[in-house]
Amino acid sequence: HPEQSLMFAHLARSLEQRTTSKRSDETLCAATVMKLDVTHLLQIGDGTELEVADRRMEEFLKMVKRMPKGIIFHHNPRLQREGFRWAPSTLMGGRPGDFFRDFEKGVSSFYGSGLSVTYPAFVIGPVTRDYNDLVVVRVEDVRFQCYDIRRFPDQGMELPAWKMDAWYAIVMRPFSTDFAVDETDGILCVIQSPQVGDLLAGPSIGVQLKLDERVVVRCECRVRIKKMDFGGVNVNARIMGWGLKEDQEWLIL
């Protein structure tokens, strides 16, 4: 339904500056505007106001079915249930453009658990200690290139603890071709499958890779990625990373 995904993008843009005193009504209004059947939304009524709002948002997104793939990089609070952690808990109050990013580059189908997208990434791991700051180091051509990774928790929540011995993917929007722009948005994810440690064993240093199968990851938090000089990096913050190509496929849970 390409026209439905376009309607969702326009709706999200309209809701950026809107508010409501009862958040559970947001999806009722949104579904009505998109001419979707609100019957299933109205049947969700048990629980606190926030619980009802979140469950209605989950159901609303399942009804929309298709949305811009860049929605995963939004700055709004995120839903917390597995399979929906990429998704916003509200479309209101967002940054301009957050919910129709990269619309012209791809629309992702949503089947009720996880969103499939293609983006570049860094893969790091296995994590063996806690990081306050994090700098991913890669060999690119004949030199080291460093990327400062800043994590951002959801509103009212703490940053998620690092999972020891886990592999992580930092899924990111490509850097702008404008050389004056050295930052981009991303999400930090725990890799669920496949066993990437085996797949990454022994690759040539500096070679950008593409894994043959879709990688399933669990979204942990939003990050900001900035290029930086290798010489000024705190040694305790460094971790080596593998770069994956722009057309690597991800299932974001």
Image (cartoon, rainbow, N blue to C red):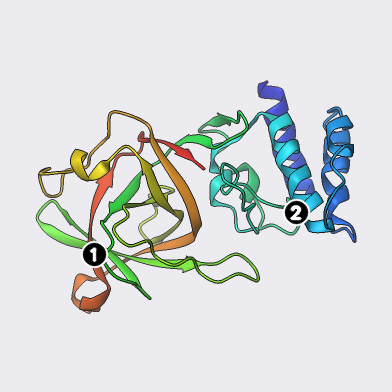
Q: Residue at image x 60%, y 44%?
A: 84
Q: Quadrant of the N terminus?
A: top right
The x and y percentages for residue 61 are 70, 37
Mark closer to the chain start, 1 or 2 = 2
* SS for callout 2: loop
Which residue lies most toward the front here? 46
Residue 108: x and y in percent read: 56, 31
Q: Quadrant of residue 36?
A: top right
Residue that label 1 marks: 239
Q: Position of residue 63 (x, y in %)?
A: 73, 30
Query: Is 29 displayed left or right of 75 in the figure?
Result: right
Q: Say which amino acid is labelled 2.
A: Glu
Q: Residue at x 62, y 53 (%)?
A: 80
Tell whether 84 sits left or right of 44.
left
Label 2 sits on residue = 16
> Closer to the camera, 129 or 1?
129
Which residue does the image show at 85% across and 51% down from the upper left?
A: 24
